Amino acid sequence: MKRFIFWDYPRASFPYDIMVALILAFIFLTPADVFRDRPRASDVAMLPGGIYMIGPEELAGKPAAERPQRAAELIRKRFRENVTVIKVEPHMGAEQEVKGFMAYTKP
């Protein structure tokens, strides 16, 4: 057990190759759900015409009056642009769930 823990096997030996195979199997065969490690799209996306699409988790808990200010902060952080957000509207999905928010800015 001590040799197994401290990896005391010489290279190109059978036990060494087994250890490497086990490590590679763990890396490539473990499902992403185990670690909840999913790639995520950007939280803020720029659309043509001074419109920005903001992910639902960024503004969902905010009151409607605070959303433009928070949207402007997110846009500044992501794109390093100083913008004034005029209005923020929820973008609804097919089942009437909020898929994101559309932030309209001044030209």
Image: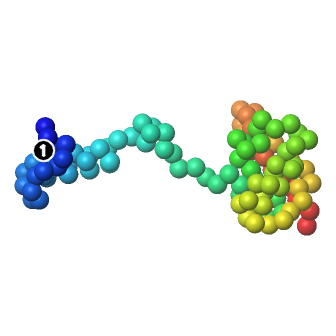
Q: Quadrant of the C terminus?
A: bottom right
Identified by mark 1, the residue type is Arg
| Residue 14 rendering spot, x and y as whole percentages | 7, 51
| Residue 66 rendering spot, x and y as whole percentages | 88, 43
The picture quadrant where one finds residue 63 is top right
According to the image, what is the colour scheme of the structure?
Answer: rainbow
Residue that protrudes farthest toward the left in the picture = 13
Camera-side residue of 89 and 4: 4
Which residue carries the number 1 mark? 3
Horizontal side, residue 24 vs residue 17: left or right:
right
Residue 89 can be seen, yes or no: no
Q: How many marks?
A: 1
At horizontal 86% and vertical 63% (from top left) the residue drawn is 83
Horizontal side, residue 8 vs residue 97: left or right:
left
Badge 1 local density, few (<14 within 10 Å), some, or many (20+)? few
Horizontal side, residue 59 vs residue 36: left or right:
right
Residue 41 can be seen, yes or no: yes
Q: Quadrant of the N terminus?
A: top left
| Residue 54 rendering spot, x and y as whole percentages | 74, 50
The picture quadrant where one finds residue 2 is top left
At horizontal 48% and vertical 44% (from top left) the residue drawn is 37
Decide: is 107 above or below 102: below
Numbered disc 1: secondary structure: helix
At horizontal 71% and vertical 55% (from top left) the residue drawn is 44
Horizontal side, residue 33 vs residue 92: left or right:
left
At horizontal 10% and vertical 48% (from top left) the residue drawn is 15
The picture quadrant where one finds residue 81 is bottom right
| Residue 49 rendering spot, x and y as whole percentages | 84, 64
